[in-house]
Image (spheres, rainbow, N blue to C red):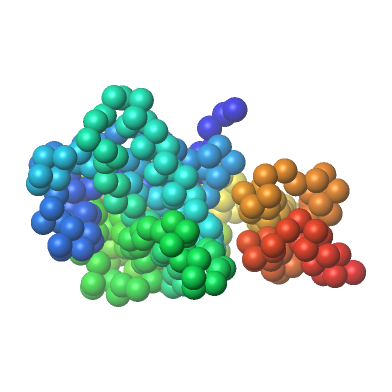
């Protein structure tokens, strides 16, 4: 199957596969007592990915080897959640990926027990992260069953919990995190000039200019349509980098044309785009309900899939996604589904 690609995935990997940027992120955002146990000089990005094929549109991941101060091998695993909503099964997904990492370690002949994995979720949705960060939060059980419940905790970087001034790092990291924070928000156009200003010195280098182009391409591909347009970007670039606009903007204009976003589009084409976006959101919501059911109950009858695929109300699909996580059995979910669509 062809690998699913999206602008969030591409930009996330472009930023965090830079070793210096990844190290800086960990130094700033891992707990201090954890940083003290890690030999950051040993940090090394691996090309392994553990995301299930049908979830690649919603998650990206990166794995780093790192040695601890006691010279044992460990890993830092980043899961980047780039949906517009937070998935209550995130802890379950991460556990599956950690098991795959341990299996990889076993196959490589690693000895002396399993390596430590530090799981880190990077989230930039509009609403604060409210999903439990402990795996046992997914269970419902009486207290005397506690010893039978496996558990672990993941770390979370939640963009909504930081003001712009609280986001730390040198220019490349800080700009990336600021863009991640604002990419879904209407204030993106208002903060773009200030964000690009952080890269003004970097723009004097060819690699710096390429990074700025990558940021702007990410914005035009990932920001909700209507929040920012070509003219907003041109104004920001002219304000911050007046001598570089001639190099940057033709590339951005080409990107906009390829995406069908260039100013001056006919009204009918705009309406078609809006309809396509709506259809895409509905399809994503339907797939999320079905994915959650498959995670819970393995095989989902085609009769249920057919009903879900026939729902055209996004609010109903979001409700069903939550019900799919909480339903005890497929029979219970079927009854819920029947009551909702009647």
Q: Where residue 313 sits: x, y (%)?
A: 76, 65
Is residue 199 in view from this perspective? Answer: no
Q: Where residue 76 sits: x, y (%)?
A: 28, 46
Q: Residue at x 47, y 45 (%)?
A: 96
Is residue 335 in view from this perspective? Answer: yes
Q: Residue 147 appears in which quarter of the rendering?
A: bottom left
- Tell me if residue 75 comes above or below residue 83 in the rendering: above
Q: Residue at x 49, y 70 (%)?
A: 144
Q: Where residue 101 sits: x, y (%)?
A: 37, 37
Residue 48 or 314: which is nearer the viewer? 48
In the image, taking residue 157 as reference, residue 282 lies left or right, namely right
Q: Where residue 301 sits: x, y (%)?
A: 80, 46
In the image, taking residue 141 as reference, residue 180 lies left or right, namely left
- Tell me if residue 78 comes above or below residue 2 in the rendering: below
Q: Quadrant of the C terminus?
A: bottom right
Q: Residue at x 73, y 58 (%)?
A: 329
């Amino acid at each position: 199957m062809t690998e699913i690609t999206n602008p969030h995935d591409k930009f996330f990997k472009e930023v965090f596969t830079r070793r210096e940027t990844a190290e800086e992120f960990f130094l700033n955002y891992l707990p201090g007592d954890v940083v003290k146990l890690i030999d950051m000089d040993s940090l090394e990005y691996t090309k392994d990915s553990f995301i299930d094929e049908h979830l690649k549109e919603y998650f990206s991941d990166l794995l780093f080897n790192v040695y601890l101060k006691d010279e044992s091998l460990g890993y830092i695993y980043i899961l980047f959640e780039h949906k517009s909503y937070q998935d209550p099964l995130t802890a379950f997904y991460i556990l599956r990926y950690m098991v795959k990492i341990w299996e990889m370690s076993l196959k490589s002949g690693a000895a002396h027990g399993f390596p430590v994995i530090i799981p880190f979720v990077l989230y930039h949705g509009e609403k604060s992260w409210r999903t439990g960060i402990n795996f046992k939060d997914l269970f419902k059980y009486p207290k005397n069953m506690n010893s039978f419940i496996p558990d672990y905790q993941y770390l979370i970087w939640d963009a909504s919990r930081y003001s712009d001034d609280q986001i730390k790092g040198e220019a490349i990291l800080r700009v990336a995190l600021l863009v991640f924070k604002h990419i879904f928000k209407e204030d993106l156009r208002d903060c773009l000039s200030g964000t690009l200003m952080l890269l003004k010195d970097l723009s004097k280098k060819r690699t710096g200019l390429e990074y700025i182009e990558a940021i702007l391409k990410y914005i035009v591909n990932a920001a909700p349509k209507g929040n920012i347009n070509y003219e907003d970007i041109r104004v920001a670039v002219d304000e911050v980098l007046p001598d570089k606009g001639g190099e940057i903007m033709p590339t951005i204009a080409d990107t906009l044309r390829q995406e069908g976003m260039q100013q001056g589009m006919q009204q009918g084409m705009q309406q078609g785009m809006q309809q396509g976006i709506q259809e895409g959101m509905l399809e994503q919501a339907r797939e999320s309900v079905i994915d959650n059911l498959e995670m819970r109950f393995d095989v989902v009858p085609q009769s249920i899939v057919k009903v879900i695929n026939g729902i055209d109300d996004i609010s109903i699909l979001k409700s069903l996604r939550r019900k799919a996580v909480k339903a005890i059995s497929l029979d219970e979910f079927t009854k819920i589904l029947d009551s909702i669509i009647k």
